[in-house]
Image (spheres, rainbow, N blue to C red):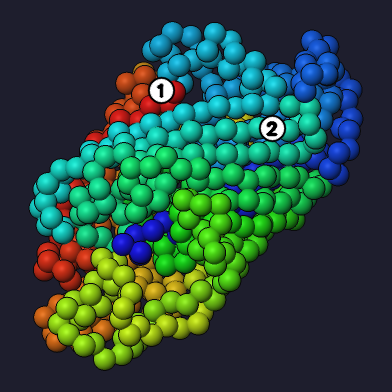
Amino acid sequence: MARKLLRSACVAAALAAADAACANEGLVQLGNVGAEPATTGDAPPVAKHKAGGKAKRASEAAPAAPWGPVPTDKISLANLVPGLLVYFNNGPVFGLPGTVTGNIGQRTQLLGDWGGTRTELAQHGFFFDLFSTSYYQNITSGGLKTGGSFVQNTQVSVNIDTGRAGWWSGGLIHVTAQSRLGDLPANTFTAGTVVPQYTGLVLPDPMQPNSFLLSEYFLVQALSTQASVVVGKISDVFIPDQTAFGDAFKYYFANFNFNKNPITTNFYNPTALGALGVWAFSPKFVIAGGVLDPYTKATSFAEPNSFEKVNLYLTAIVSYDIGGLPGQFSPAYNWSNKPKIDLEAPFGRLSSPAAAKQAIGSLIGLASTEGLPANFKDDSWFVLANASQYLFVKDNAETVARKLKTGEPIRGIGVFGRVGYAPEATNPITQDFSVALFAYGLLDQREYDSFGFGFYYNKISDNLKISIAAISQGQAAAHDESGMEVFYNLAITPAVRLIPSYQHIWHPLAAEVAERQGSADIFQLRLTTAW
């Protein structure tokens, strides 16, 4: 199961995207930490706002719309770049633009504003969000085994804006806890694919099925108009390698290949301790990078071997538009000195048929290498990129500009895709690509509905194929894996989404090698609620 762990890269890409959006809106006024921002000269009078127990007068732009900026003396990231909180949550944030209260059929969060308390807390910098996703799958044919299973994912996220709270300027504290209940891994990782057919299976930890764990806690701090840092435990499932739209597994595609690049699973766990930096060279070009620990788990604050080896990550975000249609391109590079199994000669002499079976299982993610004469290489690397481009936008230009900053979904049609490469001597997936068509809010009567269709292709390492054939004495063979997914997100209410989907997988690696199954058909149903 080791290779089914979600391992991606760098939370800094999120902050980079937010920095770029901030600059695009002319709001890069972060200044040095602790500096007092200048009062907007032509801002209309506003009421005093209490934060941190002290009366605050307006020192940023007065709210132009509900859920917009609130007056503070200290610089507030929620005021300047509200989309940053949405990015970290991988979902909507109550109290920011896009929030709707009112009757239960209109609310974007099912529990609303708690009689006004939730709104008051958000205005003072405290944002509380709860998401639940009930997931059912049925492997109707192929895979490791057929049949149905159920998983319940729950996410609790807290964001504290230190500027709104009156603590200090330009800070954001993010904390997330995750739980997974339901069927055990042996009954859910049953498609036999290289990475999970449902991304939520790995949260908070793929081998901790009935658990509630603190999976993220980090500080974001703006240092100047161009520089920011992120320090703490971050999510490698939510934050890195996000495309501009369509890759939140709670709402859109379920398969991991459409949410993150699958090559990264050989380098990262679902969470990672790290220190990252962001530098905005211009409103359209931002770079980010840093060091992340490859051993971090959600089950503890730090592992005994934390930072004995490292991942060094570098990424960039380039934003643009073509004829008024937004687009984004983001390349990334990662180097790691954490040992990887040598797929050219993965094992020494195997002592028995049972050892050979375990060896094959370890190569396809169904067993560990413990007790085997395994060979390792000292380092490895990958390069990858994602791109997103809208083809049609239903919102007007002013609304699009606002939503790019706030993180609200843009109504329209777009395509996004990923490509990646890693050395085949150390990586089960050596090349990959995916492409997806995504649409959101096309009908005025169904503005929260969305649908998508995607295809992916994973080239399996030739070294891995040769080693499997040799160890099995020609009894097992691996081929390149590919698959498709189609889904429809039906908004029962803005807060409650029912999402049926279907996947067909060609040559699922583990199922083909272990069970001689050349395909898998998967029907899925998700019920996601923002509380």
Which is more toward the observer, 405 or 76? 76
User: Eyeballing the image, is 222 above or below 167?
Assistant: below
Amino acid beneath label 1:
Ala
Amino acid beneath label 2:
Asp
Residue 447 x/y as whole percent: 40, 24
Q: Quadrant of residue 426?
A: bottom left
Query: Mark 2 or mark 1, which is nearer the start of the sequence?
Result: 2
Residue 102 x/y as whole percent: 48, 9
Query: For mark 2, what is the residue?
Result: 161
Which part of the image, by quadrant, shows the C terminus?
A: top left
Residue 444 x/y as whole percent: 40, 20
Q: CA distance from mark 1 to mark 2?
A: 24 Å
Residue ID at (39%, 12%): 105
Give the SS element for disc 2: strand
Q: Quadrant of residue 153?
A: top left
User: Which of pointers 1 and 2 indicates the residue nearer the eye?
Assistant: 2
Query: For mark 1, what is the residue?
Result: 495
Residue 324 relative to residue 503: left or right: right
Binning the other alpha carbons within 10 Å of mark 2 as few (below 14), some (14 to 19) or many (20 upward) gives many
